[in-house]
Amino acid sequence: MNAALGTIAGRVRAVLDEMQRAAARAGRLPESVRLIAASKTVSVERLRQAVDAGVRHLGENRLQEALPKIDTLEREGVVWHFIGTLQRRKVKSVVGRFETIHSVDSLALAEEIDRQAKTAGLRQRILLEVNLAGEASKGGFEPTTLVAALESLNGFEHLDIRGLMAIPPPTPTAEDARPYFRQLRTLAQALTARGYRNINMQELSMGMSHDYPVAIEEGATYVRVGTAIFGARGE
Ligand SMILES: *Cc1c(COP(=O)(O)O)cnc(C)c1O
């Protein structure tokens, strides 16, 4: 066991190395995949260690928890991503503060983001969250509803739609998650082929601590990794 793996910096390096190897296996450029460190429940001191070790992107689930972290790490040049369930009444505070909102799970939410982005005078980058396995416990667009949704979304001038995000159902092994990752990529390709003017499907946000190498082999452009960097959250 490598002693450096006992530190956040060591684990960041291990994850970045593993990401490079997965990209190489798939014949992809290492810079085509970005690491987002999932920062929920992690203190700002520990986040700073990750940033010092080379993490540029942080992903937060809850607005209240994110705000003081965003302020404290302001000078570090961190790019913030919103990855948790977003309530419509929080949209106003999220728009413009996070580079990308990964978890846009309904038309109503997209519409509110568009509205608030218009008020703020910006275009908000978003990804559409897809409920791949039709799990009742999870939000997200059902794959079969996405085409109809895009017809509406294409008219929202203050959204910059960049791609898809998914959290597959728990699987016994990373390998078992592969069909879900492949399904998300295929879906993005099918939607791209429809040629919507305002919609770009190049980003795929998929893969977490237990399965990110497989997600990269299947085309992930963002992986969201928490436990493998910061340790167990004790949830
Ligand atoms: C917590 C979280 C992650 C990271 O999960 P780990 O299993 O700890 O890597 C990724 N994505 C989302 C949306 C999360 O909430």
Image (cartoon, rainbow, N blue to C red):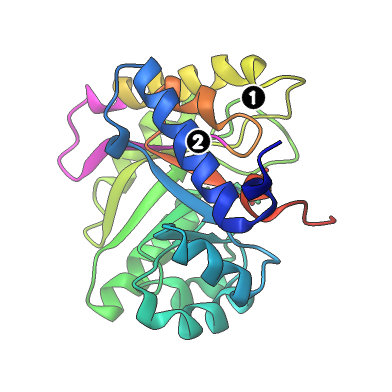
Residue kind at label 2, given as amino acid type: Met
Q: Which mark is residue 206?
A: 2
**Quadrant in the picture for residue 139:** top right
Against 146, residue 35 (above or below) is below
Magenta stretch holds residue 118: no
User: Circle 1 is placed at which residue position?
Assistant: 133
**Quadrant in the picture for residue 173:** top right
Residue 202 is situated, as x and y percent measured from the top left of the image, at 28, 35
Residue 155 is situated, as x and y percent measured from the top left of the image, at 24, 50
Q: Secondary structure at mark 1?
A: loop
**Cα distance in 3D space between marks 2 and 1:** 14 Å
Q: Is residue 26 visible?
A: yes
**Quadrant in the picture for residue 188:** top left
- Give the mark nearer the N terminus: 2 vs 1: 1
The answer to whether residue 17 is left or right of residue 2 is: left
Mark 1 crowd level (few <14, some 14–19, many ≥20, 10 Å Cα):
some
Residue 43 is situated, as x and y percent measured from the top left of the image, at 66, 73
Magenta stretch holds residue 195: yes
Q: Residue at x 46, y 65 (%)?
A: 51
Q: Residue at x 66, y 32 (%)?
A: 210
Q: Residue at x 58, y 27 (%)?
A: 132
Query: What stretch of residues is rendered in magenta?
Result: 191-207
Against 66, residue 209 (above or below) is above
